[in-house]
Image: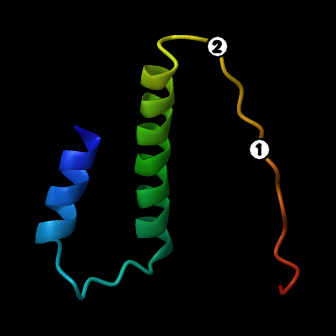
Amino acid sequence: MLLEVNSVILKYASKNVMITSPKNQKDIISVRAKLTMTDLIYDLDGGLFGILVDESTNITL
C-alpha cells in the first residue's frame, strides 16, 4: 500500500515545489518517522526491536 501511495504522490506532485522552510522540513521528517515506525512494527509482526540513535553537531556554526 505504501508503495502505491508514494507512486501516486510522485506522479501528481508539482515539480517546482520548494520545501526549504524549517517547519516544512520538520513536518516531512515527522511524517516519515511515523511511517518508518509503522513499517518496522508491521515487518517484525509485533516482535521486539531497538533503535540506536547517534547525535552529531554542526561544527560550521
- Numbered label attached to residue 48: 2
Q: Secondary structure at mark 2?
A: loop
**Height in image: 4 above or below 61?**
above
- Numbered label attached to residue 8: none
| 47 left or right, relative to 41 | right
The mark lying in front, picked from 1 and 2, is 2
1 or 2: tag closer to the N-terminus: 2
* Viewer-nearest residue: 53 or 22: 53
Residue named by callout 1: 53
- Picture coordinates of residue 31 (x, y %)? 40, 48
* Viewer-nearest residue: 31 or 10: 10
Residue at image position (51%, 11%) is: 46
- Toward the right, the furthest residue is 59
**Protein image colouring:** rainbow
Q: Are marks 1 and 2 in contact (CB under 8 Å)?
A: no
Residue at image position (82%, 50%) is: 54
Q: Quadrant of the N terminus?
A: top left
Residue at image position (43%, 30%) is: 38
Q: Secondary structure at mark 1?
A: loop
| 16 left or right, relative to 52 | left
**Height in image: 28 above or below 44?**
below
Residue at image position (21%, 84%) is: 15
Disc 2: CA contacts within 10 A as few (<14), some (14-19) or many (>=20): few
- Picture coordinates of residue 40 (x, y %)? 51, 29
**Height in image: 1 above or below 50?**
below
User: Which amino acid type corresponds to the residue marked 2 in the rendered image?
Assistant: Leu
- Picture coordinates of residue 59 (x, y %)? 88, 80
Determine the CA span between mark 1 and mark 2. Answer: 17 Å
| 33 left or right, relative to 24 | right
Disc 1: CA contacts within 10 A as few (<14), some (14-19) or many (>=20): few
**Height in image: 45 above or below 61?**
above
